[in-house]
Amino acid sequence: MHVLDDLTARGLVYDVTDREGLAKLLAEGPVTFYCGYDPTAISLHVGNLVPLGIMRRLAMAGHRMVAVIGGATGMIGDPSGKTTERKLLDKETLVRNQEAISAQVKQLVAGNAIVLNNADWIAPLSLLDFLRDVGKLMTINYMLAKESVRARLEDREHGISYTEFSYMLLQAFDFTYLAKQHGCRLQIGASDQWGNITCGIELCRKMGGPELFGLVAPLLTDKSGVKFGKSEAGTSVWLDPSLTSPYRFYQFWVNTEDANLDRLLKIFTFLPLEEIDRVVREHQEIPSKRIGQRRLAGEVTTWVHGAEAARRAQAASEVMFGGSIENLGDADLEPLLADLPWTQLARAELEKGLPLVDLMARTKLVDSKGAARRLLSQGGVYVNNVRQDDPNRVLWPADLATETMVVLRAGKKSYHVLKIL
């Protein structure tokens, strides 16, 4: 399948400036393309995986990648998709963010990507030179027609500053510069970048450059219209494991609704379309097994965090679904401590014997020892996901599931981890 057809079949194409022209260009030979990432945070988030995935697919088809980190544009702030002015970052924060995002991009595209910083060619420009060489070519009327500008102008309370109004010209200049210096012919991004991308194509035309192309992916949102990539708590799901652990990252994908499964498998995994169809059919036979969600979570977590981190996240997740804890170690269960209540106990206590009824009350899994006995008699208490029914049950060192941990459960979903040191 032609790479453009594959992108379309996966739901990754929202619009193209000239589909026939781009298809012909891609078919003729290696095409240099670029995508920009402004360093507005210390890490990229799951929404950024959409353009990163497109970059990787184009590279797999033999095309050449350029990633631009917005050292200059990040100082301005893109008004696209924003209802209020962005908070400007200090230079020290921007430099730190640039370095972190550059490393993430190189890792995730998994190819010979050229990573550039647009401050290298924008910062040396004087204001007068930029106004004469770039600003003179683009009319205010043209810029006002762009959605990113028009929407802000209609908001009388916030409006748009001249600083953010100028952002479009800076990104347009990026495209023109890259076309001249690196032979770049295609820019990709999310649909909210359409105005910026087409402005770059127009600027290059007016400056006598080659015909350029733009391809944008749909901007994914949830039911309420919020950009895709927020956890249930409303926080961003980051790609940096120190901000969002691989376990929580994995859980984000496991919680995908059935209705979105086919779409997200196509967008965020590199599985062949035929295999995705098979996975979805298998999932639909017994939805309660969440076969599709687990495959999605495994594929994306492996892409972002590596196979070993994905394996551990999956193992911890299976424990939460009542799976066996046999053959797991501390490293496998460690991710649970970020999400589950846990208590540290001295090993000497366990060696003396810990009555299960006492532990259930002590860890607040039940309100009292009497409640613990009743739940035990009903078969609703589990140690390391193994059902218990003896009210006189005592825990000993032999009950450790891993080197230092014991997992208690009351009912189906109430967990507590004992950390024995």
Image (cartoon, rainbow, N blue to C red):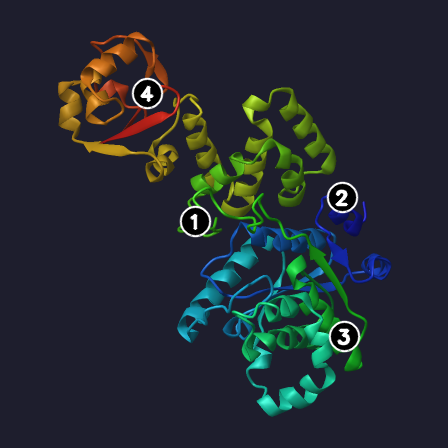
Res 410 label: 4
The residue singled out by tag 1 in the image is: 241
Disc 1 crowd rating (10 Å Cα; few below 14, some 14-19, many 20+) is some
Earlier residue among tags 2 and 4: 2
The residue singled out by tag 2 in the image is: 9
The answer to which of 190 and 49 lies nearer the viewer is 190
Residue type at mark 2 is Ala
242 is higher (above) or lower (below) than 87: above
Earlier residue among tags 3 and 4: 3
Res 202 label: 3
- Residue under the point 70% across and 63% down: 194
Earlier residue among tags 1 and 2: 2
Of badges 2 and 4, the one in the foreground is 4
Quarter holding the C terminus is top left
Res 230 label: none
Q: Is residue 154 left or right of residue 332?
A: right
- Secondary structure category for the residue under label 1: loop
